[in-house]
Amino acid sequence: MASKVLVASNRGPVSYSVGEDGSLHSKRGGGGVVSGLSAIGPDAGALWVCSALSDGDREAVRRGAGEEGVRMLPIPADVHADAYNGIANSVLWFVHHMLYQTPLEPVFDAEFRRQWAAYETYNRAFAQALAAEAAPGAAVLVQDYHLCLVPGMLRDLRPDLRIGHFSHTPWAPADYFGMLPDDIRTQLLRGMLGADRLGFLTRRWADAFEACAERFAGGLGGTRVGVHGLGADADFLRARAHQADVAERMEALRDEIGEGRKTIVRVDRTELSKNIARGLLAYGQLLDDHPEWREKVVHVAFAYPSRQDLAVYRDYTAEVQRLATEINSRYGTPDWTPVVLHVKDDFARSLAAYRLADVALVNPIRDGMNLVAKEMPVLSDEGCALVLSREAGAFEELGEDAIPVNPYDVIDTARALHEALTMRPEERAERSKRLAAAATALPPAQWFLDQLRALEEGSEPGPGP
Ligand code: G6P
């Protein structure tokens, strides 16, 4: 049956693995789009089109065993690797997060062109699948920088559809975006401008896109632009964080931290834009500038593996581990480990750390939103002080009650950590409450439904009073 609402994204809501006895096991992911689709209910005729990423996913496709409402595309592994690792994660992610630095600036050579061809093939596979599955006049919500060409390609195949695209990343300023080869940047912008409506997480990223469209593509044409600041899923998080496995992990973490110590918590993918290394340097600086904190504070840092196919991510993981070890051997004592670093993904343990946090450290160089900054104030048992980078999208909503930092400045970050650790308990609790309220203003289901409604209505609400 043709679908009336379609979502397209690289990573889908479910992944499969094959057990030793050959049976298939599925694991569901979370996030805004998952909540949104469950909110519109099973009768809405929704379909999620995504990539088959693992051997288990490909096996599920082969057996025709995939979940209802999800269509996994068995993109050839080499095409996917070039499109995802080569273009999406090595070029587009780096451009929008402004991560290039000498000598890592891009070289747009024949290898890049070969990978670009894979990116086109990959996007076309999505456009064709969506065109084949969509009911007349259906709404299609395309997600993120992996699929920038899909709106334009789909528009050519199916002019009847209402097409939206949402960027979960920042958007680069025009001067930086301009480093892409002329024809590529035009293709990317035209691809996105094939949509009826583009969504961004903050006004800042929407403005940056509009500036790029203006400079490199002659403006927005008929495409509308909207801002939807995804919030934390308070109901889900609160329920999940009070289950038994989280309580067990809180006990284990308390043992690692030690009695009566303050905690500075961070939880990230091990991702260059998250700026984990400078966070550790700032913590070392704090212990230098304020020796009174020695033995009295622990930095709980969870840095989960991400994009390990890319050498630059593997090197960064090693760098984070090296810095943590260095701080521990420099300052540690027989009964105090200054940094508790965990690198194995464990959601229940993340929630346990959120509940124990006195200080939340969120210091990305650039970040589309950063949900950790929104989740920690919601879950911290005693209320936490939030040290927050001005370059995180979340800063637009949380800036007033956070302690702002320049993410490059480790001395400033150390100062902010000290301020957070010494904040009066009543002030900390009050600020944390206000942060939690701002962080949950737009729950994921509403975030998704707002976009769907705006796409279907065909016009933007006028400016407020
Ligand atoms: C960013 C992107 C998301 C993506 C996530 C994980 O937050 O905006 O779309 O899902 O990173 O990245 P991965 O490469 O593991 O899918």
Image (tube, helix red, strand yellow):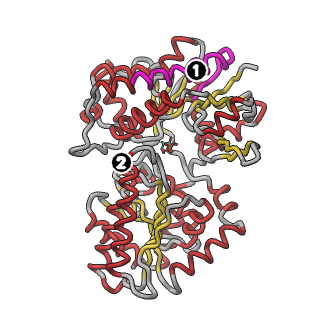
Residue 461 against residue 405 in the figure, above or below: above
Asked whether residue 436 appears in the rendered view, the answer is: yes
List x then y, in percent, for residue 173. Answer: 29, 36
C-alpha distance separating marks 2 and 1: 38 Å
Along the horizontal axis of the image, is 264 left or right of 183? right
- Towards the viewer: 208 or 92: 92
- SS at circle 2: helix
Residue 27 against residue 248 in the figure, above or below: above
* Residue 241, quarter of the rendered image: bottom right
The extreme left residue here reads 102
Residue at the image position 30 percent from the left and 71 percent from the top: 415
- Towards the viewer: 218 or 12: 12
Labels 2 and 1: the sequence-earlier one: 1
Name the residue that disc number 2 marks. Answer: 312
List x then y, in percent, for residue 245. Answer: 69, 67
Residue 171 against residue 398 in the figure, above or below: above
Residue at the image position 33 percent from the left and 20 percent from the top: 217
Name the residue that disc number 1 marks. Answer: 162
- Towards the viewer: 193 or 255: 255
List x then y, in percent, for residue 201. Answer: 46, 41
Residue 143 colored magenta?
no
Asked whether residue 192 appears in the rendered view, the answer is: no
